[in-house]
Image (cartoon, rainbow, N blue to C red):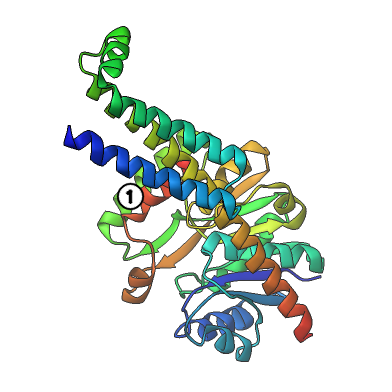
Amino acid sequence: MLIQIILLAVIALIVLRLAVKLRSEELSVKQFCGWLAIWILAAIAVIRPDLTVSLANLVGIGRGSDLVVYSALIFLFYFIFRLLLRLEKIEKNLTKVVREEALKEYDRQQ
Amino acid sequence: MKPIAIIPAFNEAAKISGVVAGIRNNAQAIGDILVVDDGSGDDTANQARSAGALVLRHKLNRGQGAALKTGIEFASRSGYGTAVFFDADGQMAPEEIGSLLSKLAQGYDVVLGSRNLGRAVDMPPLKRVIKLAALVFTRLTTGLRITDTHIGFQAWKMPALARIRLDQDRMAHASQILSEIARKKLKYAEVPVTISYDAYSIKKGQSGWNAFKILWDLLIK
């Protein structure tokens, strides 16, 4: 089906980007493997949707596509949570830097 | 060393010199007045300096809690024994600093100003309702027997201040201070203070919505 070809092309592009980022060391090997695993799973789900159906039935969900959506949602929520924590840490560090700078500047003026 | 007054200020050029002068003239107990300019885009720092305050400048706006903490760090490394927190928008009455300090001298770690023991002049009704909700919330979560919350008018002994954790950069710092008072079992007292609400302070101050933002900061972060 057409949709399968489009999705596979998109996934291939994403994996290509990952590989480029790995080579330029923007991604660590560990991060690369994690993302690669996720996209390989996605590719499998695209090529063999019947597999997601049997997996969905196994956990008591009727349709394979529902299972995919549910797992994607859980993954996204977790990811946003991680991002929020990370952001908060950056904010706190920023405050520390600004504070130290303010105190140092005061000392310089004395 | 005489007590230090710590005033976090963000874009308060219009009011700050009056506030500094007010403390200078009406609170003889105060030694130094420290204004922490929290990344203001206006002339707050210069105004404060010419009014005779010590000035620390945040290069970026980090929030009232962050500015207060910067002031606290300055006070503790400079060896002050007592610190008074004061607002920059002219809502507080500097002559009442004396009553906080004399209460503190009776052996408390911290003395909090209370609008409900004192007088809140022209507080908008919606604000009253939100304050009441905040008070119930604070009493339930901290167990403190206080009559007012989220008031920036406080006097502290420095050793007690050094013991509490204060890492909420934005407005949730006020709640954090209260829960830290409870957690560290500090000796606290309240004294009545007068807070006036004019058009300026209402515009500059907390909108009701911020209550939800504070709750978010407290629960999520």
User: Residue B141's x, y, as percent?
Assistant: 49, 34
Q: What element carries label 1?
A: helix
Three-letter amino acid code of the residue under disc 1: Ile
* Quadrant occupied by the C terminus of chain A: bottom right
Please state the horizontal and vertical placement of residue A78, each as a whole percent of the image: 43, 34
- Residue hosting label 1: B130
Where is residue A25? Give x, y as percent: 61, 52
Instruction: In this rendered view, identify the residue nearer to me: B77 or B97.
Output: B77
In the image, taking residue B47 as reference, residue B127 lies left or right, namely left
* Residue B119, above or below B36: above
Q: Which chain carries label 1?
A: B
Residue at 60% x, 62% y: name it. A95
Q: Quick check: A110 above or below B69?
A: below
Question: What residue sits 65% from the left and 70% below the top?
Answer: B5
The local crowd at label 1, few if under 14, some if 14 to 19, many if 20 or more residues have their Cα within 10 Å, is: some
Of the pair B191 and B41, the residue shown nearer to us: B41
- Name the residue nearer the viewer: B18 or B44: B44
**Count of numbered tags:** 1
- The quarter holding residue B137 reads top left
Nearest the viewer among B69 and A91 is A91
Q: Looking at the rendering, which quadrant does residue A107 occupy?
A: bottom right
| Left or right placement of residue B31 versus residue A70 in this view | right
Q: Image quadrant of residue A98?
A: bottom right
Q: Is residue A45 visible?
A: yes
